[in-house]
Image: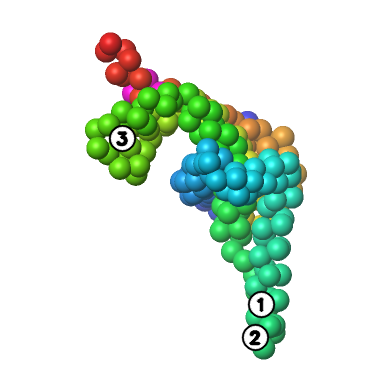
Amino acid sequence: MNEALTLLSFGDQGWGDQIARGVLITVTVALATLPFGLILGFLIALAKNSSEPSLKLAANIYTTIFRGLPELLTLFLVYFGVQIAIQQGLKLIGFDAQVEVNSFVAGMVALAFVFSSYASEAFLSAFKGIPYGQYEGGHALGLSRYQTMTLVILPQLIRLALPALGNLWLILLKDTALVSVIGLPDLLREAGIAARVTKEPFLFYGIACLIYLVLAMISSTGLARIERWSKRGDTAR
């Protein structure tokens, strides 16, 4: 027991500093990915809900690709594909240089692509749950299409999509473990390094499991409070 506490302590003798840094990276990646994934997912849902056939087709192709590919493969395609694309672009203009994409940015972009493809379906279902009379009501009040969307439709859309988006957030939080394969020092990578060096895999992977569970419980509690807040008007009625 004392040996385990020493290994998990902060300072030169323990791995507490590295594990804490890994937790910070994990949470940061998830929080940085979330807004981009939500905005992109909302735009894709708008395209799917559009009357323009070309927009619908492009949105459907996008979601089919990123929902069909394994998340790890998407991560590799973004991380290595962008590097190759930049290098080839530089060669076309006469520069021959090695380019390395930042692993944090690559991980965030890849996870945002995957998250947005599923979030678009949540938003699309929410769109279908809003009666068309809401749009007509906004038009009758003299609101523009933009004002109707932002003032009338969007608040209802978020409330309807919130349960599904909450589940997607928990999935995103777990998927951040994938960024360890491209060298980002997240929780799983730091736990793996500590396990190999100390020959204590059960201890450090067990700690990683507990930390992921704690993050999930904190997220679930926060999401439950947000859902109650979003339904405060219904409770009052």
3D distance between C-alphas at marks 1 and 3: 48 Å
**Magenta segment range?**
225-229
Instruction: Name above or below for residue 49 compared with residue 96.
Output: above
3D distance between C-alphas at marks 3 and 2: 52 Å
Total marks placed: 3
Outermost residue, left side:
141
Taking the spot 66% from the left edge, 77% from the top edge, the residue there is: 89
- Crowding at dot 2, Cα within 10 Å, few <14 / some 14-19 / many 20+, comes out as few
Residue 41 shows in this picture = no
Report which residue position mark 2 lands on.
93
> Please, what is the three-letter code of the amino acid marked with disc 2?
Ile
Q: Where residue 139 is drawn, which disc sits there? A: 3
> Please, what is the three-letter code of the amino acid marked with disc 1?
Gly
Q: Assign the magenta stretch its main secondary structure.
A: helix
Mark 2, secondary structure of its residue: loop
Instruction: Name above or below for residue 211 compared with residue 57.
Output: above
Along the viewing direction, whichever of 117 and 152 lies nearer the viewer = 152
Q: Which of marks 3 and 2 is in front?
A: 3
Q: Are marks 2 and 1 in contact (CB under 8 Å)?
A: yes
Report which residue position mark 1 lands on.
89
Taking the spot 35% from the left edge, 42% from the top edge, the residue there is: 145
Could you tell me residue 236's position as x and y percent? 27, 13
Mark 1, secondary structure of its residue: helix
Colour treatment of the image: rainbow
3D distance between C-alphas at marks 2 and 1: 7 Å
- Lower position in the chain sequence, tag 1 or tag 3: 1
